[in-house]
C-alpha cells in the first residue's frame, strides 16, 4: 500500500482486513513508486499479489517468487511490531 494516499480513509480499512485474515502487508513511500513496481505509469494506491496456478500447471518459479515476497513482507511486519512494542 502507498503511504502518501490522500485522503487516508481510502485505504484505512485495508490493514484491519489483512490482519483479520492473516494476510501480510507493507507500506511503501509513494503511490508513484508502487505504480512503477507494477509496470504502470499511473500512481497506484494498493496492489494485491495472489498466488494462483497457471493454466499449464507449471508454476514452481512463480510460487518461489511469491513465497520469497511473502516471507520478506512478513519479516518487515514482525520487525516493525518488535520495534514498536519493545
Image: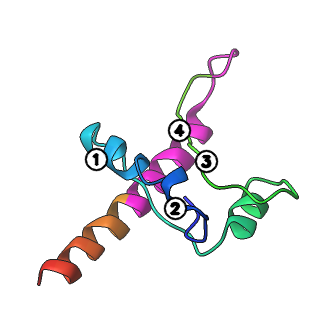
Identify whether 44 is placed above or below 75: above
Whichever of labels 3 and 2 marks the residue nearer the N terminus, that label is 2
Q: Any mark on residue 47, and which?
A: 3
Which residue occupies the foreground of this view, 11 or 30?
11
Could you classify mark 4 by the number of other residues whose Cα lies within 10 Å: few (under 14), some (14-19), or many (20 or more)?
some
User: Toward which corner of the image does residue 12 lie, by quadrant?
Assistant: bottom left
Q: Disc 1 designates what residue?
A: 19
The residue that mark 4 highlights is 63
| Residue at the far right in the pictured view | 41
Query: Which range is magenta?
Result: 54-73
Q: Are marks 3 and 2 in contact (CB under 8 Å)?
A: no
State which tag comes first along the sequence, 4 or 3: 3
Say what secondary structure mark 4 lies in.
helix
Figure quadrant of the C terminus: bottom left
- Which marked residue is nearer to the observer: mark 4 or mark 3? 3
Q: Residue at x 61, y 64 (%)?
A: 5
Q: Residue at x 71, y 55 (%)?
A: 44
Q: In the image, 80: left or right of 71?
A: left
Q: Is residue 8 above or below residue 20?
A: below
Amino acid at each position: 500500500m502507498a503511504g502518501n494516499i490522500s485522503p487516508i480513509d481510502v485505504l484505512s480499512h485495508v490493514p484491519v482486513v489483512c490482519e483479520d485474515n492473516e494476510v501480510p502487508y507493507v507500506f511503501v513511500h509513494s503511490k508513484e513508486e508502487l505504480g512503477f513496481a507494477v509496470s504502470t505509469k499511473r500512481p497506484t494506491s494498493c496492489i494485491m499479489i495472489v498466488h494462483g496456478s497457471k493454466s499449464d500447471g507449471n508454476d514452481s518459479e512463480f510460487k518461489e517468487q511469491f513465497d520469497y515476497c511473502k516471507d520478506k513482507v512478513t519479516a518487515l511486519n514482525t520487525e516493525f511490531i518488535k520495534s514498536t512494542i519493545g
